Amino acid sequence: MHADMQITPTKPFILRCFLISLFLSLPFLFLYLFYPQQQQQQQHHITTKDLRIRPGYSSYESYIQRQLNKTLNPKLRKIWTTRDWDRKIPVFARFFEDLKVNKKLLKNTSKALCIGARVGQEVEALRQIGVVDSVGMDLVPYPPLVMKGDFHNQPFQNDTFDFEFSNVFDHALYPQRFVAEIERTLKPEGVCVLHVALSRRADKYSANDLYSVQPLVELFKRSALVHVRSVDGFGLDTEVAFRKKGEPLRRHRL
Ligand SMILES: C[S@@+](CC[C@H](N)C(=O)[O-])C[C@H]1O[C@@H](n2cnc3c(N)ncnc32)[C@H](O)[C@@H]1O
């Protein structure tokens, strides 16, 4: 028999198999391409009754750029490092002194981080009251008080800090990520204190609006609520403190 005559019947068969497997794999291809994106959005972009992400950021880059536009403004930086410096440090120092002396949530030996610290007034306040191992983190560094970092992806190892403070929760585009990073970098039993605005809307650079403490309690999955109280902190009216629960979780940075 001629060689061609043996091969010819297998060709349509192989082609058919190829087309069938291509057809069967299409749903998986579709899932691969689109599911992670959807899942990511659901994971990060939580919007609940009491926590709403502001619309209008077309991309993460546009969110960062908007934050930078203000933080890098030379005129504002001048004000923050002169007039505001003397006005705000004593106020921060009073908050921290109270957390140390009355609430026992902070010690002189605590390793402390201030998130979204801009030019580091709160870091300076911590150092002045004796918490000398304190550092700030912001998109824009301001050495030696503030190092560069994005709070959605903190540049620190797991279980690094005893105490973390932030008054910029409203600037988080991904609140879930903001909190997960705090819980990752806090040591077990470490304390996080947030100053947030509940009864008024924060500034136009905010990325979310918070209407009660409940979303925070839900986001701090690895921590216990310590206290909620009223404060008068530069337009922020509520202090919420959490303590991270026991055992360290051994995993790599997110
Ligand atoms: C309202 S200011 C607060 C400054 C400072 N905590 C104070 O009380 O003076 C918000 C700060 O958050 C910073 N910020 C915004 N998004 C950030 C991000 N993704 N990671 C780190 N810092 C961020 C901004 O650069 C800005 O300095």
Image: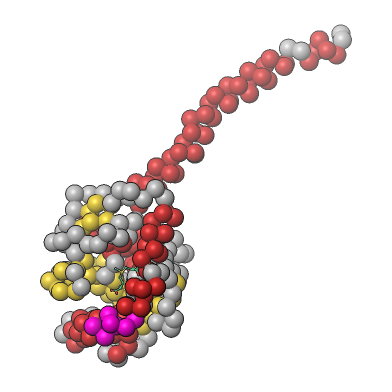
Tell which residue pokes out farthest to the front in this image. Answer: 75
In terms of image quadrants, where is residue 112?
bottom left
Magenta region, main secondary structure: helix
Quadrant (top left/top right/bottom left/bottom right) for the C terminus = bottom left
98 is higher (above) or lower (below) than 193: below
Is residue 168 rendered magenta in the image?
A: no
- The x, y position of residue 95, in whole percent, is 20, 81
Residue 45 visible in image: yes
Q: Please name the residue shown 17% across and 81% down the image.
A: 103
User: What's the magenta region?
Assistant: 81-87
Residue 93 visible in image: no
Q: Please name the residue shown 28% across and 52% down the image.
A: 53
Determine whether, in the image, residue 198 is placed left or right of residue 1: left
User: Which of these two is toward me, 70 or 134?
Assistant: 70
Determine whether, in the image, residue 63 is placed left or right of residue 13: left
How many numbered tags mark residues here? Answer: 0
User: Which of these two is toward me, 217 or 209?
Assistant: 209
Quadrant in which ligand 1 is drawn: bottom left
User: Which of these two is toward me, 3 or 199?
Assistant: 199
- The x, y position of residue 183, in whole percent, is 34, 67
Quadrant (top left/top right/bottom left/bottom right) for the N terminus = top right
87 is higher (above) or lower (below) than 1: below
Determine whether, in the image, residue 235 is placed left or right of residue 68: left
Q: Please name the residue shown 17% across and 57% down the image.
A: 211
In terms of image quadrants, where is residue 212?
bottom left
- The x, y position of residue 207, in whole percent, is 30, 57
In terms of image quadrants, where is residue 242?
bottom left
Q: Please name the residue shown 19% across and 69% down the image.
A: 236
- The x, y position of residue 235, in whole percent, is 19, 69
